[in-house]
Image (cartoon, rainbow, N blue to C red):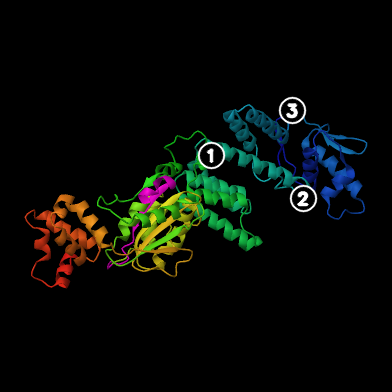
């Protein structure tokens, strides 16, 4: 508290007299009753409290050097303050002016008024006034008004794109006011808009831990919703009027229609019934959302899954993703690496990726929640490779291929993929080699289909040999002087 009288600073050193001056200034232009002043000055008033108060007011008048500053009324005392004489009045006037600017839609003027209002503060209200009663009754409302002014100014700065400059201030505010969730939310938003998504999520972890330890509660709905939006890079988090290509939300727009599907095999034939059943199951709103295509190596699981995924593109307009898990290879792809690749593909910066597979899975689920996304997980070794990649909402769907039926995968429907029939094998040979070439050697074609046991990979290997050597006939291939098993192994590439 500081008092200037006639342009000259007046020191009031006695604590009780400072309390009287503060109470009168808080209620400037109003009479403060003697009993109320006694309540402010003493926690346990002495027997001669009134006489002591009169003496203190007299000394205060002498300290101010002007006996007219404090007036005596019939019930107490008052200090008159003309417009512009009291910074508390000026503070309130500037807030009113800021409110009018807000109503007129003038953020620049509003920001200027709020800045001037906050500049009047030199520290906590009445920090040097020793009156518990005064602090309990008058300071909290004024302090809350100051904090609300800070919050409003920060919101304007965030809307203006000054997020990078606010991070330090907001870290100080969350340290000084750790239970104020509004400051934590603004810190998270400033970090996110500054392309520091991981730090924004870390701030949420900090406030959640703090609230749990101090109060035994979780963050409120507003903070939880903000965390979800940050995980999903929700476009609503962008500053008003931000360009479509600016900021983290642009990464969401860039993957809205992300398609990673390999091209469908040109020689894909038959399996029309399987294909129809799978498409119907995944296109419907009430069907299963996880389908496992399982069967032996080379039987055509991947080709069927990719073809079905292409058929379903219109049913899953938010993206069709393909992941090669290499489950049956020498080096199956670690789940954390798979999750990292997917998150980077949908716009999460590499530096912002969480370290653990569990945390990455949480980010992925949040990003695709309620989106119509189709994931093709090809060549899964076991359930562990698949579980972390499953979406959390039924709007998304998953097609898994595996040599195993993945019986421990909950909620999945399983489709065995069997070998092609002889007719289907012949149709495939016609598609690859040309109908004329196959029809000219029907007996040899039937025998070749039998040797390949209806395995599409074997049929392709045999066709590749025939296409590479135009002089080699189907008869030549099946009559090679080897046992049938050996010839089949050659055709399978073994």
Residue 109 quadrant: top right
Residue 364 quadrant: bottom left
Tag in front: 3 or 2: 2
Q: Alpha carbon of mark 2 to alpha carbon of mark 1: how far?
A: 33 Å
Q: Is the residue 443 above or below the residue 5 in the image? A: below
Image location (x, y in percent) of residue 382? 38, 68
Q: Secondary structure at mark 1?
A: helix
Tag in front: 2 or 1: 1
Q: Alpha carbon of mark 3 to alpha carbon of mark 2: how far?
A: 27 Å
Q: Which residue is mark 2?
A: 136
Q: Is residue 346 visible?
A: no
Crowding near pointer 1: few (<14 within 10 Å), some, many (20+)?
A: many
Q: Name the residue nearer the viewer: 137 or 99.
A: 99
Residue contact at pointers 3 and 1, CB within 8 angstroms: no
Residue contact at pointers 2 and 1, CB within 8 angstroms: no
Q: Which residue is mark 3?
A: 83
The C terminus, quarter of image: bottom left
The N terminus, quarter of image: top right
**Which region shows up in magenta?**
309-330
Q: Is the residue 330 above or below the residue 27 in the image? A: below
Q: Which residue is mark 1?
A: 158
């Amino acid at each position: 508290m500081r008092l200037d009288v006639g342009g000259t600073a007046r020191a009031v050193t006695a604590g009780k007299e400072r309390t009287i001056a503060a109470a009168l200034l808080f209620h400037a232009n109003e009479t403060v009753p003697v009993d109320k002043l006694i309540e402010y000055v003493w926690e346990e008033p002495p027997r001669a409290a009134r006489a002591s108060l009169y003496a203190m007011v007299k000394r205060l008048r002498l300290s101010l050097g002007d006996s007219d500053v404090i007036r005596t009324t019939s019930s107490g005392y008052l200090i008159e303050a003309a417009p512009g004489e009291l910074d508390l009045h000026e503070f309130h006037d500037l807030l009113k002016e800021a409110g009018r600017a807000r109503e007129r839609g003038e953020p620049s003027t509003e920001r200027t008024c709020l800045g001037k209002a906050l500049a009047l503060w030199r520290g906590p209200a009445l920090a040097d006034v020793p009156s518990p009663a005064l602090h309990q009754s008058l300071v909290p409302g004024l302090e809350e008004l100051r904090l609300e002014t800070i919050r409003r100014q920060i919101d304007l700065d965030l809307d203006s794109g000054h997020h990078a400059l606010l991070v330090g201030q907001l870290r100080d505010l969350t340290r000084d006011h750790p239970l104020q969730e509004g400051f934590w939310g603004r810190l998270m938003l400033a970090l996110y808009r500054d392309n520091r998504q991981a730090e924004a999520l870390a701030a949420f972890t900090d406030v959640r831990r703090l609230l749990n330890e101090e109060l035994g509660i979780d963050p409120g709905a507003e903070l939880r919703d903000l965390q979800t939006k940050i995980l999903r890079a929700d476009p609503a988090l962008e500053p008003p009027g931000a360009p479509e290509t600016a900021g983290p939300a642009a990464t969401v727009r860039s993957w809205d229609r992300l398609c990673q599907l390999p091209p469908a095999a040109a020689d894909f034939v038959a399996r029309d019934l399987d294909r129809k059943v799978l498409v119907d199951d995944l296109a419907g709103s009430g069907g299963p959302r996880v389908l496992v295509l399982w069967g032996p190596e080379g039987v055509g699981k991947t080709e069927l899954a990719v073809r079905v995924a292409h058929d379903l593109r219109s049913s899953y307009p938010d993206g069709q993703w393909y992941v090669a898990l290499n489950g049956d290879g020498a080096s199956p792809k670690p789940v954390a690496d798979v999750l990292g690749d997917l998150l980077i593909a949908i716009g999460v910066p590499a530096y912002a990726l969480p370290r653990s597979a569990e945390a990455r899975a949480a980010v992925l689920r949040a990003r695709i929640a309620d989106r119509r996304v189709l994931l093709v997980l090809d060549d899964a070794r076991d359930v562990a490779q698949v579980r972390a990649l499953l979406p959390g909402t039924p709007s998304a769907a998953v097609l898994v291929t595996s040599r195993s039926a993945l019986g421990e995968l909950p909620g999945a429907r399983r489709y065995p993929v069997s070998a092609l029939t002889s007719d289907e094998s012949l149709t495939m040979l016609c598609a690859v080699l040309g109908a004329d070439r196959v029809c000219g050697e029907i007996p040899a074609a039937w025998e070749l289909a039998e040797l390949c046991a209806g395995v599409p990979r074997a049929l392709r290997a045999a066709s590749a040999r025939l296409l590479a050597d135009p002089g080699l006939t189907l008869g030549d291939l099946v009559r090679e002087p080897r046992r049938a098993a050996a010839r089949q192994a050659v055709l399978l590439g073994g």
